[in-house]
Amino acid sequence: MKIKTLIACFILACAASSCIQDEALNSEAAIDACTGSDVQQAAIDFENFTIQLYVSKAADLAKVNINFQLPTGATIAPVTSHDGDDPSIASYNFKAENPRKFKVTSENKSFEATYNITLWQTEMPDTYHFENLSSDNPFHVLYEQDNTEGTDGSYVVRRLEWASGNPGFNLTAMAKNPTEFPTVQVTGGVNGGKCLKLETKSTGSFGTMVKKPIAAGNLFIGSFDTANALVDAMKATRFGFPFFYYPVKLEGHYKFKAGSQFTSNGTVVEGRQDHCDIYGVLYEADENVSFLDGANSLTSSNIVMLARKASGTYWPETDTWQPFTLDFELKPGKSINPDKLDKGIYKLAIVFSSSVDGASFEGAVGSTLHIDEVKLTSTNQQ
């Protein structure tokens, strides 16, 4: 019996040792993402440990809300503390120092990484040429930048990094190179330069397995939450950027050709044709609605103005560039509060999609929308 007991103890000890080894503390030290009520976009250079953080021009730089997404067990702290820093509520003072250094320490305390974070107060640019890429690996990420000096001598960066569903499509492993994603930059623009190409794609066996058989090519002002892409694809798209003016119209150029076979959640629907979508939406953010998403971007009660084709009408197919114009119209019973406008409480989104119902996985593989030279017109007066 004693021998059996000793053997049992030995086995248990080995098992315990194995469990301890399997649960070794994490050795990663990195900043995976930055979010927060003030953060509009975050461009992270993982090789050089730098972050360009873009916040609304209405943000209080003395208490910027930044939620750092870190590897399991890792911790973060500013290298130099300033009055107003309060990590317990993710608030940091960039008025006292900008850029600032933040040190990340791994869970096992063996590794550290120091990031240089620069904060930029931004507002939306109003012209979109689709000429610039901030990244082309693994997919194209487009941005616009138009830095201007205000009439009062202030300087505000007018920068916008476009969002798309490319990060979600990347999970399917269907694209062998950046040009095979649904949203890409291509040549052949209106003026001979680059332009935007959106194409509805099959998501292959992976998409069939998760009941998301197609992915529409889309581009929008906002951000894409990859972590939510498989759980709730519609909520993965977060539309909007703070806007401080009264929008008037959205105009530009487009080409569109529908795919040959329309499907609804993988089932062929005979006689139905796919259509593209182009629209702009202004809405009021509040404690319940920070962003619109794919489920409510056209139906939310927070919407104040909408620029879109009338219900039941669609963009004609065309092989050549055609101009388009959409007027922003107030929703019934809605108005814009000038004080809220000045504070950046209203947000505006512009959305392009190769399949109008692509968010519901309805559309035709091969539907292709080209967009170029877009202009958003607004005014300072109501």
Image (tube, helix red, strand yellow):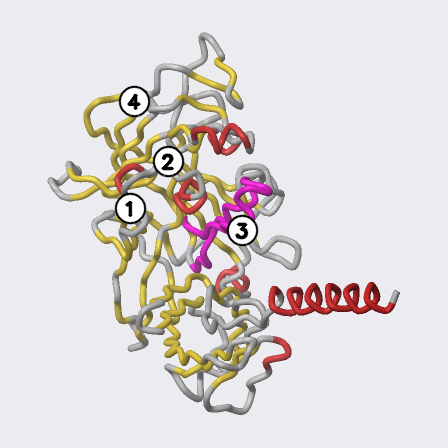
Residue bearing the label numbered 4: 257
- Up/down of 73 relative to 346, above or below: below
State the image quarter where residue 243 is shown. bottom left
Q: Secondary structure at mark 1?
A: strand
For marks 4 and 1, the one nearer the N-term is 4
Identified by mark 3, the residue type is Ala
Q: Amino acid at mark 1?
A: Lys
Q: Secondary structure at mark 2?
A: loop
Q: Is residue 336 above or below residue 231?
A: below
Residue 326 on the magenta span: no
Badge 3: residue crowd in 10 Å (few <14, some 14–19, many ≥20):
few
> Which residue was labeled with disc 2?
174
Nearer the camera: disc 2 or disc 4 = 2
Q: Which residue is pictured at 37% across the width and 43% down the height?
A: 219
Q: Of the residues under marks 2 and 3, which one precedes in the sequence? A: 2
Residue at 33% in and 31% down? 199
Query: What residue did someone put label 1 on?
Result: 375
For label 3, the SS is helix
Of 368 and 1, which appears nearest the observer? 1
Which dot marks residue 265? none
Which one is in front in this view, the residue at disc 3 or the one at disc 4? 3
> Residue at point 57% right, 38% down?
295
Number of numbered tags placed on the structure image: 4
Between discs 2 and 1, the one toward the N terminus: 2
Name the residue beneath numbered marker 3: 227
Work out whether 282 lies above or below 62: above
Identity of the residue drawn at 32% across and 61% down: 159
Question: Which label's residue is closer to the chain start, 3 or 4?
Answer: 3
Q: If you read the primary sequence from the N terminus, does the residue marked by circle 1 or circle 3 appear first?
A: 3
